[in-house]
Amino acid sequence: MIDAQDYAEFARFLSDCCGLVLGENRQYLVSSRLSRLLDEFGFKKVEELLRAMRQSSSPRLKSRVIDAMTTNETSWFRDTYPFEILRQVVLPELAAKQRPIKVWSAACSSGQEPYSIAMVVAEWEASFPPKTTPVSIVATDLSETVLAEARAGLYDGLSIARGLSPERRQKFFETVEQGHQIKPDIQRRVRFQKLNLMDSYSLLGKFDIVFCRNVLIYFSAETKRRIFDGIARQMDPGGYLFVGASEAVGSYTNAFEIVRTPQGTVLRRR
């Protein structure tokens, strides 16, 4: 069992570097997630790994620890309704302004969300040709491991089945020996890059649409406030923010208003 001092110091490390709040008595969670790294780095106990991490300047060790502790739960078209709002409401409205549309998928994990967005854009473009409004998608995550998976666009049978219809699987993927490869037309629509949500977003530029869904539930109230304010600064008035169904943004910022549509609710930059 991790002792109280080691646990407290590790909790502070996670909070400082990536905003995650462990809370009390989560030693079992830490042990179970970090135990998979023991053989990789030649340790026998999680406590040894934690102490080495504090004493080491190795960015690889710290990066792998963050990877292990970050929840990368994701699926295709998660919750469905945000993607229907995107297709039926947001894209047509923004396209009417006749200027390029920029989309940001924050904390994109292994790519299911930004590729789902890209599929919706492709379907929207095909439904109402000709389209003269270019749509660009930037997807970010703090984990190099999941970004590498996302860039590869190759998924096994289990991950491909989570939320993806047979029709879209046939349309947007090729079956290869290693699994299911997303087709180049969808893959080239998304640009992946590393970004920690605790850092500045200014170099990303301005966005018309931001997906930051089911990401901040593990963050402190102050960190949520800082992140939502940072997102708001990267959006012009009239831009749209998609968050998780249980995430109440109004508790942390007044930069957004709720928009109710037949498909569900979305937030709009005031």
Image (tube, rainbow, N blue to C red):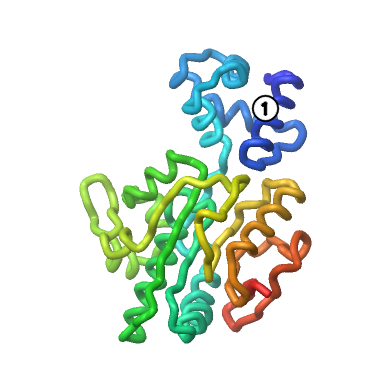
Look at 60% across and 16% down and name the residue there: 55
Q: Helix, strand or loop at disc 1?
A: helix
> In this picture, is 78 found above or below 111?
below
- 161 with respect to 84 (left or right): left
The residue at which mark 1 appears reads as 10
Q: Nearer the viewer, residue 216 or 268?
A: 268
> In this picture, is 137 found above or below 257?
above
- 71 with respect to 164 (left or right): right
> In this picture, is 69 found above or below 82?
above
User: The C terminus appears in which quarter of the rendering?
Assistant: bottom right
> In this picture, is 28 found above or below 2?
below
Q: Nearer the viewer, residue 172 or 269?
A: 269
Question: Which residue is outermost to the left?
Answer: 177
Give how far across and how far down residue 174 sits, in percent: 24, 58
Give how far across and how far down residue 91 sits, in percent: 47, 78
Look at 75% across and 37% down and name the residue there: 23
The total of numbered circles placed on residues is: 1
- 168 with respect to 141 (left or right): left
Q: What is the crowding at mark 1: few (fewer than 14 residues within 10 Å), some, or many (at least 20)?
A: some
Give how far across and how far down residue 97 sits, in percent: 48, 84
Look at 49% across and 71% down and name the residue there: 83
Give how far across and how far down residue 176 sits, in percent: 22, 51
- 123 with respect to 25 (left or right): left
Q: Is residue 254 visible?
A: yes
